[in-house]
Amino acid sequence: MPTIAEAPESSTDTVPSLKDLMRKAYNLSLDLGYCEIAPDGSFLTWREDASIPEADMGTVSSWADGLMHKYYIDRANGRCSLAATLSFDVEAFEAEVQKDIAMMAAHVARIGPPRRLDFAEMYSRGYRGAWAGEVSEADTAKAA
């Protein structure tokens, strides 16, 4: 995938923006970082997979925690040292984001996305409430 700087201006192909790439990296980090999801989409259990190298899991957790977004915003807005702001190379950062996306996509393809738990399993684990898929009598009455 070409970087934004490498994309020809007259290209009819849509080149993803850095914002799009960062969103994709974030979403992949959630798919790779968590192994279980509640019925409402809440992430429950962090993945402890020995087949993923520790350095890769460090990158995944940096994306999932929002640290990579903070890193970019701090450098782009000058919320760090002047030297760090001046030496920040957006093209190099974009290339790093693309490398992270490729790494996370390969792991997700190999391991698979998180498993969505159903209400019975959530209930057996002691989870209660609408976020766990439980429907209250008041919700049933409203729907009727």
Image (spheres, grey):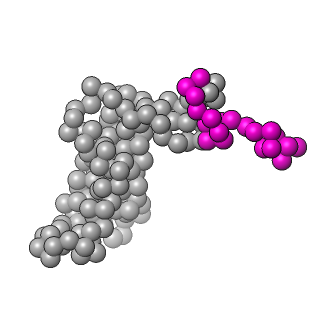
**Residue found at x 39% / y 35%:** 46
Above or below residue 57? Residue 142 is below
Residue 25 visible, this orientation:
no
Left or right, residue 41 beside residue 100: right
Residue at 29% from the left image edge and 49% from the top image edge = 62
Residue 134 visible at all: yes
Residue 103 point in image, percent of width and height:
28, 40
Q: Where is residue 96 in the image (x, y as percent from the top left)?
A: 23, 53
Say if the magenta span includes residue 80: no
Q: Quadrant of the C terminus?
A: top right
Q: Which of 133 and 94 is in front in this view?
A: 133
Occupied quadrant, residue 23: bottom left
77 left or right of 36 in image: left
- Residue at position x 30%, y 55% from top? 67
142 vs 62, left or right, is right
Q: In this view, does 104 lie above or below 71?
A: above
Find residue 20 and report its horizontal and vertical position in percent. 40, 58
Q: State which region is magenta.
A: 124-144
